Image: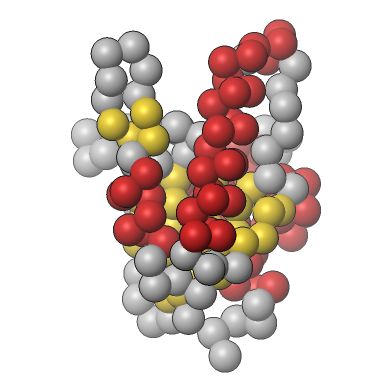
Amino acid sequence: MIVVGVDPGKEGAIVRLAADILPLVTTMPVISGAKRNEYDVRAIRDLLLGCSHVFAEKLQPMPLQAGGTIANYNRGYCMGLFIALCTALALPLTLVRPQEWQREMLAGIPGEDTKQRSILAAQCLFPVTSLLPTPRCRKPSDGIADALLIAEWGRRKLGGWA
């Protein structure tokens, strides 16, 4: 069984979890463009091939003060992309609200900032998995941490590796 966790968005990540092997962590595949990066749909599809279940964070519109209409459009586009790919590949897809997976996965992790708490929780659960988006980065990615935690949350919901 391979469980996939997705933190949608161009700064997000896709994580494949399988029993007895290290998680496969991929920052959201994008193709650099002249004005904006575009999602690399083929690369995303390839990451989903062969998996058993996809768990993705359910996005909600942000207020205009927190990112505006372009951010909302891109986030909605990303969700539609995953819904379409999972439908086309006949993969089960579960959309989970952030509060739902965070309630379980961040329990006992101190602090107020959910991004920092996600990084700490992912480092505790997956100590040998790098949260750095590239080898040259110094700052862990909360997108990778969230995708790892969403995948683990999904694995637990499915009953483990049975």
Q: Is residue 45 above or below residue 38?
A: below
List the single residue furthest toward the front.
Answer: 88
User: Closest to the observer: 97 or 118?
Assistant: 97
List the single residue furthest toward the top.
Answer: 65
Q: Residue at x 71, y 9 (%)?
A: 65
Where's the C terminus, which quadrant?
A: bottom right
Snapshot colouring: secondary structure
The image quadrant of residue 114 is top right
In the image, residue 60 lies at what x, y percent?
Answer: 73, 33
Q: Is residue 154 above or below residue 78?
A: below
In the image, residue 77 lies at what x, y percent?
Answer: 55, 33
In the image, residue 30 lies at what x, y percent?
Answer: 33, 35
Q: Is residue 129 above or below residue 8?
A: below
User: Closest to the observer: 91 or 22?
Assistant: 91
List the single residue furthest toward the bottom.
Answer: 162
Exactly how many numbered labels are in the figure? 0
Q: Is residue 52 above or below residue 70?
A: below
In the image, residue 56 lies at what x, y percent?
Answer: 60, 52
Q: Residue at x 31, y 49 (%)?
A: 43
Q: Residue at x 28, y 20 (%)?
A: 33
Q: Can residue 155 be seen in the rendering of this structure?
A: yes
Apparent side of residue 13 relative to residue 77 in the rendered image (left or right): left
User: Closest to the observer: 11 or 129?
Assistant: 11
Q: Residue at x 44, y 45 (%)?
A: 13
The image quadrant of residue 37 is top left
Q: Can residue 121 be seen in the rendering of this structure?
A: no
